[in-house]
Amino acid sequence: MSSGTAGAASWRPASSTCRSTVDLALTSLRPRRTWARGSPWWPRGSCRTESPPSAPPWSPHHPRFITRAPCPLPSPRSFVREVWASRPGCLSGPEMGHVSTCYTRGTFLMAFSWDAVLPQIPVKSGGPHGAGVLGVHLEGPFISREKRGAHPEAHLRSFEANAFHDVLTTYGALDNVRIVTLAPELGRSREVIRALVARGICVSLGHSVADLQAAEEAVQCGATFITHLFNAMLPFHHRDPGIVGLLTSDRLPPGRHIFYGMIADGTHTNPAALRIAHRALPQGLVLVTDAVPALGLGDGRHTLGQQEVEVDGLTAYVAGTKTLSGSIAPMDVCVRHFLQATGCSVELALEAASLHPAQLLGLEKRKGTLDFGADADFVVLDDSLHVRATYISGELVWQAEEARQ
C-alpha cells in the first residue's frame, strides 16, 4: 500500500472493532487544560483549551463511534438514542475513521438491569446512517475484586453457585453480545467459557489475578482474547508470568495464538511495554481505545455511570483517587502513538486496528480487508496517518475540510 499527501492519500482498511471502551493519552503531559495544535498524535487542527468544545450536532448521516455506554439515563431506551445524542463525550466522529465497532458495557451503569439495556443495542450494518455495531463487549461483573480497576466493587459477582446459569441470570439474552471479559481464576469459569464459546461469543481474560496455568486452561477451554494487556492483571514475574505469559506459552491449542488488546495511549502502557508485547506476538496485537464518555469534554469532572471521573490534561481518574478510569484519546491517536513507540511499519500499525480485530471476531472475510467481496469500509489517510475521509459500504460519509478543496 502506498502512502500519499492530501492530494494522493492512501486507502487503508478502517477499524473494524474497538474496545470502548472508552477504548487515550499521550506520552507526555502538556500544560493543564491545553493540548497544542499540531501535536504529532492528536487529531489534526484540534486545540483543547479551558472552555470545553461545543457539542457537535447529532446527525443520522454522520457515523459515530459510541465509546463506553454508561451515562446517567432516564430509561433503558434512552440508553441508545436520546442521551448519547446530547453528550459529545460519548461519541467520536467519523473524522477518526470508525466504520464499525464493538463497544463496552461495564459495571458502571447499574441503574438498569443488563437485560433491560442489552436489547436496546442491536447488531446492525454500517452505511450512510452511521457506523455499524458488531455487538456488545460485556466487561464485568465476573472479574477480580483485587484487579477491578475503576469497576465498583459492590457490583462484582461470581458464578460459583450455578455457573453459566448465573451468567444468563445477570445478562439476560446474549443475542447482541460479541465479547465477554471474565477472570479465569473464578470458580467454575471453565464451564462458563465453554458455554459462551458454544454460543459464538468471544471470551476475553482480564481484570484478573490468574496465574499462567489458569490462563492456559482458559485458552484450552476456548478463550481467545486478553482485555487490555498489562492493565488490571498481575504483573509479569519470571517464575509465573501470569496472563502476560500467554503471548509466548507453548501450552495453547495447536495452530492457535492468543489475541490481546493494547491501550497505546502513553499512559496505560509504557512504550517499552508496547515494544515487548509487539515483538513477542505482533500478529495477535489489537489496538483498543478504552475511551470513556469524557473523551472530548475537556478537563474537569464528568460522569461514568454512577461514578465521577476527573480529567486532568490527558489522563482520566476515578474522582478523588489515582485509579485510571479508561482513556480519553480516540483510535487514530492510538495508531499514531503505537507506530512511533514500536517503530513498526505503517502497514502493521494499521492492521492492529483493522485486520487483527476482524480476525479475532472471525470477520476477516468482510472486515479489515479490501479483498473482493469484503465490505467496502475504509478510511483515506495522509502520510502522517490523519484521517482525510471515511467510507462506509462504499459511500463517502465524512471528508476533511481541506480534502474538499
Image (cartoon, rainbow, N blue to C red):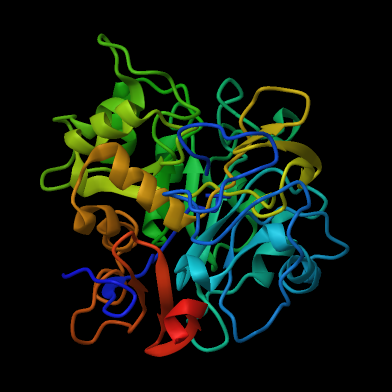
* Spot occupied by residue 393 in the image (x, y as percentages of width and height): 40, 87
| Numbered label tally | 0
Task: Say whether residue 216 is left or right of residue 296.
Answer: left
**Residue drawn at (77%, 64%) of the image:** 54
**Is residue 386 depicted above or below 286 in this figure?**
below
Q: Quadrant of the C terminus?
A: bottom left
Residue 222 visible in the displayed image:
no
Task: Say whether residue 114 is left or right of residue 286.
Answer: right
Task: Say whether residue 148 is left or right of residue 10.
Answer: right
- The residue lying furthest to the top in this view is 239
Residue 267 visible in the displayed image:
yes
**Residue drawn at (38%, 54%) of the image:** 197
The foreground one among 213 and 89 is: 89
The answer to which quarter of the image holds residue 148 is top right
* Spot occupied by residue 132 in the image (x, y as percentages of width and height): 50, 76
The foreground one among 33 and 263 is: 33
* Spot occupied by residue 373 in the image (x, y as percentages of width and height): 23, 87
**Residue drawn at (31%, 37%) of the image:** 341
* Spot occupied by residue 335 in the image (x, y as percentages of width and height): 37, 52
**Is residue 371 depicted above or below 142 in this figure?**
below
The foreground one among 382 and 55 is: 382
- The residue lying furthest to the right in this view is 74
Q: Quadrant of the N terminus?
A: bottom left
- The residue lying furthest to the left in this view is 255
**Is residue 189 depicted above or below 138 in this figure?**
above
